Every structure is written in C-alpha cells, then in structure tokens.
Amino acid sequence: MTTYVYDFEHGDKDQKDLLGGKGANLAEMTKLGLPVPPGFTITTEACRAYLEQGQAPAELGVQVTKELRLLEQKMGRRLGNADDPLLVSVRSGAKFSMPGMMETVLNIGLNDDSVEGLGRIGGDERFAWDSYRRLIQMFGATVMHIESSRFADALDAKKDEHGAKTDPELSVDALRELVDEYKQIVRDETGRDFPQWPREQLDMAIIAVFKSWNTERARLYRRRERIPHDLGTAVNVCTMVFGNMGDTSGTGVAFTRDPSTGHSGHYGDYLINAQGEDVVAGIRNTMSLADMGTHHPEPFKQLEQNLHLLETHYRDLCDVEFTVERGKLWMLQTRVGKRTANAAFRIAGQLVDEQLITMNEALERVTGEQLVQLMFPQLDPDGDRTLLTRGMAASPGAAVGTIVFDSAAAVAKAEAGEKVLLVRRETNPDDLSGMIASVGILTARGGKTSHAAVVARGMGRTCVCGAEELQIDANAKTMVVGDRTFGEGDWLSIDGATGEVFEGELEVVPSPVMRYLEEGIERGVEGLDDETTELVKAVDRLLTHADKVRRLDVRTNADTADDSRRARQLGAQGIGLCRTEHMFLGDRRVLIERMILATSDEDKQSALDALLPLQRQDFVEMLEAMDGLPMTVRLLDPPLHEFLPDLTELSVKVAVAEAKGEPDARDVELLTAVRKQHESNPMLGLRGVRLGLTVKGLFALQVRALAEAAAIRKQAGGDPRPEVMVPLVGSINELDLIRDEAERIIAEVAEQQGVELQMPIGTMIELPRAALTAERIAESADFFSFGTNDLTQTTWGFSRDDVEAAFFTNYMDKGVFTVSPFETIDRTGVGRLVQLGAEGGRAGNPGIHLGVCGEHGGDPASIHFFDSVGLDYVSCSPFRVPVARLEAGRATVGDSDATA
Ligand code: PEP
Ligand code: MG
C-alpha cells in the first residue's frame, strides 16, 4: 500500500520530491530535536493522484485519521474538542518554493463550541473569537471560493458601526456579531453552512490545497520560473501555535547570515503579539532580532542557538520562520535561503574559509546565471532610487533611458542620439527595430519566455517583462502605475537582474566583476572597497577552481579579431565556430553578387579572386589573436540569396523603373538572379555543403585563404592552428568530396609557401541523418561540432525564425515544454541525437575531437548535458565564456542534472 502521509518524525531534508520543501525541512528540524509543533505531511504523490483522478486516493482518509490520532495523543488534545481544542494549520509546500501562489488555512478545528473552549484555556475570549472569524474568512475565501471582499466589507462595516479604527479595537461582542454575519455570508454564497465538523474542515482544506496547485496564478508562476506542472504540492498539517496570545508572544523571520551581503551574524524581524502574516504584510513596524533579545531574552537565546545549529547542519545560509507562544519558542519553517548573486559568491567563499564546505561544494553553490548578473553594468546601489514597480528579471543589465511607446519613435529618437527605453504592453516581431534601437525593454505582460524576453536575451539587451502593475496605453502614450502617470520622454531606469523599475535617470556603474574578468585579479581589485573586493576575490577563486576541475574545454564563437581577443581575455581556449558569412557582408557583398551573376567561369573566378586577399587578411588577424589555440573556420553556410537584395523590394524597384521607361539593366539582371535563387524553404535548401558542391570554387577560395593565412602566420613565427569545418553534412559522401579538394589545396599552399600545414578537417553535425550515420562520417572527420541550433530545427521540424514568436508562448502555456528547446537542449530528443552522434563518432574514429557550437554551448543546463555525454568542448559567444567555464566546472563536481 502506498504511504501518503508521513509525520514530521519520519522524513528528512532530502525528500523534497515527496514531502515538498517545507515538509522535508520540518522533518529535518524535528530530527535535529528543534521545537517544531508536531504535525504530518501529505505527499506530493497524493496530490498528483488527486489531480489525475479528480478524487483523493481511497487510502488517504484512513492514513490521515491514523496520523491525526497519533497527533492528538501526542498533544493530549482532540481536534476541535469543545473544552480544550487542538487546532491545526493546513499549508501547501511544493518541491520548489512558490511563495504566495497556493493556499494556506489556519485555525482549522474552531467551531461554535470549540471557540468557547479556546477562549477559556487561553483566558482570552477576544483572541478566540478573532481566531474564529479569521478561520471563516480564510476558509470561506480559499476553500469555499467566496469573493474575499464580501468578508472584508463586512469587517469594515463592523468597525464603522463600533467606531473602531483598527481590527484590534473590535470588542468580543463585536467579533461574535461578525462571526454570525460571516456565517450568513457563507450560507448566502454557497447554500450551505460553514462546516462545524472539524474533520470536514480538515478534509476540505486539504483538497483545496491540492487544487490550488492548478490555479491560473500558480500555473503562470511555474511557467515563469520554469517549474514543471506535474510535480504537485505536498500538504503540511501542523499544530497551531499562536504568536498573538499577548505580550509574551510574538512571531518573526530570521536568517543565519545577511542574505544580501553574506555577512555572518543573525538577521531578521520580530513582532510582539502578532501572527505570521502580520510580519510579511508589513502593516506594523517590526523590530530587529537584537531588540527581540531585550524583550524576550529566553526565546531569543534559544533562537540564536537554533540558527547556529541549522547553519552548521545545512552548511549554508538558512532562513526560518518562528513563533513565540507565551514565552515558548516554536520553529515553523526553515530552508536554505534565497540570496542575491553577489551574496551567493561571497557566502560560498566565506563558508569555505570557515571550513564548513569544500571548494567543490562552493562551486555547486553558485550558478552561471548569477555570474552573468554580476558581469553587467549595474544601477548605482548608493544612488537615490524610487522604486515604481517590479516585473520579471528577463535579461540582466541596467538600462536608463526616456520612455518611448513604439518602434518608430524608438528608432527616430535613437538616431537623434537619445537613449530610449521601449515600453510596451507586450512585444511582437514588428517591434524588433525598436528593441534594437533601445537601451532596454519594459513590458507589462509576459514571462521569461515571452517574445520580449527571448529576443532581448538573444541580443544582450536589458529587459524587464511582465510588470503587471503597469497600465500601458500606446495610443495615448501613457504609462500609469498606481496614481502616477508617465509619458513619452520621461526618464526610467530598469534593472534586468532584479526586475526592478525605478523612476528617473539613475547612475549606471560598470561591473567590477567584468573589469576583473578582462584585466585579471590584480588590476581587478584596484581601488575597490572591501565589500566589492570580497566579491571579486570570491568570483576569482571559484572560477579558478572551476578551471582546475573542469573536463570540458571552452571555446568561443567569433568572426572578428576583436571578438577573438575579447573572448581570449575572458578565458576562451580557442574558436569553436567562425561563421565566415559575416565576412562577406558590407562592402564585400558586391563581390558575392558579382560571383552569383557571373555568366562565365572566368568572370566567376575573377570575382572569387578578388575576395581571396580580403578573406585571407581576416584569417591572418584572427589567427594572430588566437595564436597557439585552435580556430575552427566554417565554410560558407547560408543560402546565397542572403547576399542578394530582397525579392519584393527589387521587384518593386524594377517595376517602377520600367513604368517610368527607365529600366536599369543591372537591376533587371539582378532580379533574374534573385528569382532563380529564391527558395520556398531556404533553411532546407541550397546551403552549407550543398552550396560548396554546387558553386564551383567557393569553398576552394575559403580553404585557400585559410591555408595561406596560416602560412603567413607561420612565416611570421606564429603558431596558427586552423581547422576547416564543413556545414550541414548529411552523408559521408558530401564530406569526402569537400575533403579531397581541401586536402589538395592545403598541400598545394604548403608547398608553394614552404611551410608545414596541419589543418584538421571536420564537420558540423546538425542534421538527424548526420547524427544517425555518425560512425561512417567519422571515418572522414577529424572532429565533429554539434550544430545544435540547426539540429533542433531539423529534429523538431521547427523553423526558428518563424516559430518562436508565433506559438512558443502558447506551447509553454500549455506545458508542451517549460523552456524553449532553442535555449536549453531538449535532452530526450535532440540530446539523444547528440549522444548517438558522439558515440558513433568515437566508434568510427577513436581519436575524434567532439564539440558543440550551437547557442546551447553557453547555456548552463545544456553544458551539464554535454559534459555528461563526454564531449570535449563547448563553444559560445564571448560574453558567455566565463559562464561556460563556471558551469563546466560545476558539471564536473555535481550531478549532471543539477544546474541550480
Ligand atoms: C548551429 O546550427 O547550431 C550552428 C552553430 O550554425 P548556425 O547557427 O550558424 O546555423
Ligand atoms: Mg547551423
């Protein structure tokens, strides 16, 4: 029989899957002997069963009864007993914290009889009646789905009637009347009485918590935080303790060290004579923990001991919620505490110094995404700031600019030299030009995978999205938040790492971590204050350790000498992908045009000959920047029409000219070529190796340019390490044809220049067929580089440019996936092909070198996967290199699934 209910004495912190975070930690605290109010946890498995079958598993009722009886025995009281009632709280608690998203019901067990008993034993009738009215209010709203304003209005009316300004001023009699009115509301709204039978209250509350897993707001939260929808929540049933039983009672929250700086010492807030929600709601001013020590010294001393014990036991910063009931301390909750990126690195360093954790463990305590946050310029933390609202931290960085409400204004103002911030309800592909022109993007709708967020991250633009308090009217050009209205031209500052939106023009300060990454630790800490020095040193220490332990090499995707140098400074160990198409744009486009238009072999060759020295010079510069390190150059990949004018635009131009009787012969010729190159599905058309085998001389030109560049570098005393990479190969025959020609050219250049040239030749694996026939292909390849962008497109049959904006948000809403497969590798599908490709590659050629150069090469979760299938390197954009170094280290010391 499945066990669906565990009391707090059975279970531990490692059972979060089954008991949820809160339940697992309550069990752990109980095991440690800390004063946890007794109770039990109903498993996530029970919740999943309920959600699947629409009813609780048959055994659940019996198991709850058994645990409840044990609890009653332990406490010497019965649930809802008229004379001396046991009261319980019923709280949700999922594996991952989802603050405020699901239900909680307190004071279960109170009814018309037990309220009197509670009043007698507590010696405080008012407290008892206030607890009862709170139960009906909370239960009515969350379990019976009555509009909460119904209760709030009745409460306000009661206060008016009795001339009371605040809740505590209501007398016992007023509260008794209010309870009657509340019960009437329940009757009116639901057609039934407020349940008087305590067990029915309990059962209804448990089901309500199960159901709250699937409320709209909970689903939305999970989508944003990328929490899977199928986990379910646990339900914790816990003996009630009261912090509002007079002046010897109180409630608070505490941290074992400062969560924003990491400084050791105990931090927190305390309220005398209050319940937990009063602290969080911020209605009353709290006192510090130190002040708690003067008012309630005994429980304070115990709390300090418990905090110390918890931090030593968890070997990490913990936060706790606690209550003091008439002088006795109760621990209500603990967990490893959330922290800022800055604090994460510093705390990891501090805990190593205190010898609580090892360097490997420290590496597991920080993430690549936290490092990214520290690499961006930041809003000056010491400046005057007025927080307007908060949204999702969608793409890090600080952006300060004046508001624009549409792309046209963004482009126009940016061209005039203004710094603008694009403010939209949500963005769509038409906003692209505005997003490019803006320093940052702010939207009122959409989560971390909305169009705005995905595109902003892709181009490294700061973005805050889903700031729902903003009312944006693009026609009226207004942004309303609370009672404030902002218009075009008003200054705003946004922090894409925290999701904060500030009024006005805040100062932006460069990132000290970035300076360290670029200039090394000695220069990196010059002139910094102690706090920042500690941070930079912690980052250095963890990155250095990651470099020491990691198995994966980290290369970069770069196609200019500048990017290459920058990436090298950031720790790149070579170039994993140089996309040569970027070298054929700008002024050189005409040369490609000439090549395409050429009618004879001579014309074509002369166009190619003109390109050769230019391409060679590019390679010389890059090989110099990457001297001594490998540099993988990919032969031309995109379809040729990308170098030609747009079909529609050119057709219009030609038609207009013809109508005027002034046809331009070259345009007409060009139009014929554009029509000829036109493809319905260019992504699956004449591109990559197919181009190399179709357009005579094109790949030959590139191989020759690279070989000659290597020769020049050798003659100059350098150590060039070029590699030739063939894109979009699906069959070994394609690769063989290119390889034969390339080898011939390399040998020719080596002889002509009198140098020895070692140039490995390999292929991208970016088609399913290539992965499936990898063993064969490997016979002709010195290396494989998995092109996971195209491999994702071709495996899913998604055209990235079309699908992301069109329906990915919908797919994520519907739970088809929690994260875009273009961002994090789809392990089970695309990942499987990578694994097959890697195994096949090694079987066909034991010495083969394996890497990845799709965007996934810089994505933390994907890096862990690539490590687990034994690739040799990942390659990513220069800015992601430090992230990849850190995550590759984390992959080595942690388990392959752990990314957070
Ligand atoms: C890829 O497909 O993963 C790749 C790196 O190539 P591109 O993105 O240039 O198509
Ligand atoms: Mg590709």
Image (cartoon, rainbow, N blue to C red):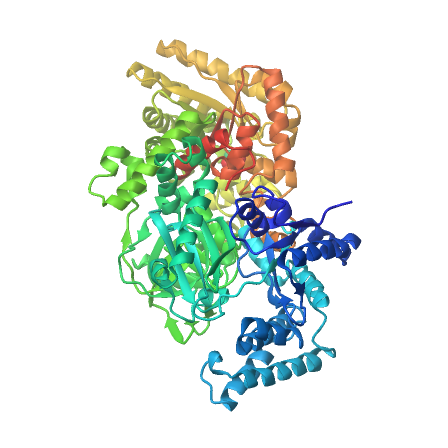
In the image: residue 685, left or right of residue 512: right
Q: State the residue at coordinates (58%, 21%).
A: 735
Above or below, comparing residue 512 to residue 602 in the picture: below
Q: Quadrant of the N terminus?
A: top right
In the image: residue 269, left or right of residue 204: left
Expressed as whole percent of the image width and height from the top left, the position of residue 858 reads 47, 37
Picture quadrant where residue 294 is located? bottom left
Picture quadrant where residue 183 is located? bottom right
Residue nearest the observer in this picture, 429 or 306: 306
Which residue appears farthest toward the right when viewing the image?
58
Residue nearest the observer in this picture, 53 or 143: 143
Q: How many circles with numbers are drawn on the protein?
A: 0
Q: Is residue 497 visible?
A: no
Residue nearest the observer in this picture, 774 or 498: 498
Q: Is residue 454 visible?
A: yes
Expressed as whole percent of the image width and height from the top left, the position of residue 284 reads 41, 71
Q: State the residue at coordinates (39%, 42%).
A: 371
Expressed as whole percent of the image width and height from the top left, the position of residue 613 reads 36, 26
Above or below, comparing residue 712 to residue 407 in the picture: above
Above or below, comparing residue 637 to residue 654 in the picture: above
Residue nearest the observer in this picture, 738 or 649: 738
Expressed as whole percent of the image width and height from the top left, the position of residue 841 reads 60, 21
